[in-house]
Image: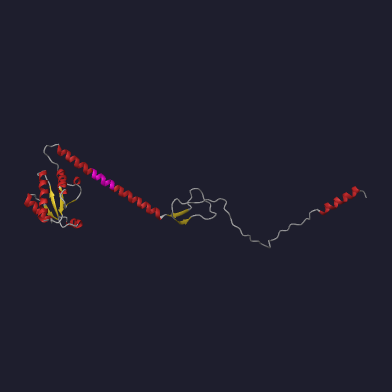
Amino acid sequence: MSILRLAGLVVATLALAQAPALVPVVSKTASRTVELPGELQPYLTVDVHARIAGYVERVLVDRGSYVKQGQLLAQLSAPELKAQIAEAESKIQAAESERAQAEAQLTAAQSTSDRLKKAAETPGAIAGNELVQAAFRVLGSIPGVTIYGPPAHERSAIVSFTVEGIHAHDVAAVLDREEGVAVRAGHHCAMPLHTKLGVDATTRASFHVYNLPSDLDRLGEGVRKAKQIFQR
């Protein structure tokens, strides 16, 4: 046998040995299952951060929910924010109240200025508020005298006051007897206010068209004499 024929037989034998085995495919029900542990990972994750500190009241979506831009995902409760809003509103109201008070004071001051200016146009005339301001200066310079009510530029021509350690009726009696100054003493139909202020009574001096600045000097002198008489 020649060498070429022998090589051909070897190649044929090897080819037959490596030929694949053919197996028929049959459809059958699975007779065995295998459980494999695993975890589903989302395709896309988004971190949601609240703008303020609060508590989650309700979640409106769940895993696997389809969401879109602008959709409400959860409802939060923020009690601290409500308290901050209430505090801010309270400050706004206080500021508005202060502004209104300042405007009222400005209006009163402007009115006083207008009255003084108009009164000054007439030679020898005295505006009522000028007497009130002078009374404040005279009485305010006497130790132990307390004047009740608003500032001089915000009141009419009436000044109520007390003298420490002396009853209002005694002050009125001395003013009448020593200086001929007529004043009123008592509650002036305002007993609840006197109770609130913690005083038994007040002495009230009022001014009108017939009063002059010299009357205020007599008022101050009479109060000083009352102090000399009752505080010896």
Residue 30 is drawn in which quadrant? bottom right
Residue 170 in the image: state x and y as whole percent: 10, 55
Q: Residue at x 86, y 51 (%)?
A: 10
Quadrant (top left/top right/bottom left/bottom right) for the C terminus: bottom left
Which residue is the extreme one toward the front? 232
| 138 to the left or right of 94 | left
Residue 203 in the image: state x and y as whole percent: 13, 53
Residue 106 is drawn in which quadrant? top left
Q: Is residue 153 above or below residue 80?
A: above
Is 144 part of what is drawn in magenta?
Answer: no
Looking at the picture, tell me which residue is in the foreground, 207 or 221: 221
Q: Residue at x 35, y 52 (%)?
A: 87
Q: Is residue 87 above or below residue 31?
A: above
Looking at the picture, tell me which residue is in the foreground, 223 or 35: 223
Q: Is residue 215 above or below residue 76?
A: above
Which residue is the extreme one toward the right? 1
The stretch of residues the image draws in magenta is 98-106
Looking at the picture, tell me which residue is in the foreground, 67 or 28: 67
Main SS of residues in magenta: helix
> How many marks are shown on the rendered structure?
0
Is 101 part of what is drawn in magenta?
Answer: yes
Residue 63 in the image: state x and y as whole percent: 54, 55
| 182 to the left or right of 79 | left
Residue 114 in the image: state x and y as whole percent: 19, 40
Q: Residue at x 37, y 51 (%)?
A: 85
Q: How is the image coloured?
A: secondary structure
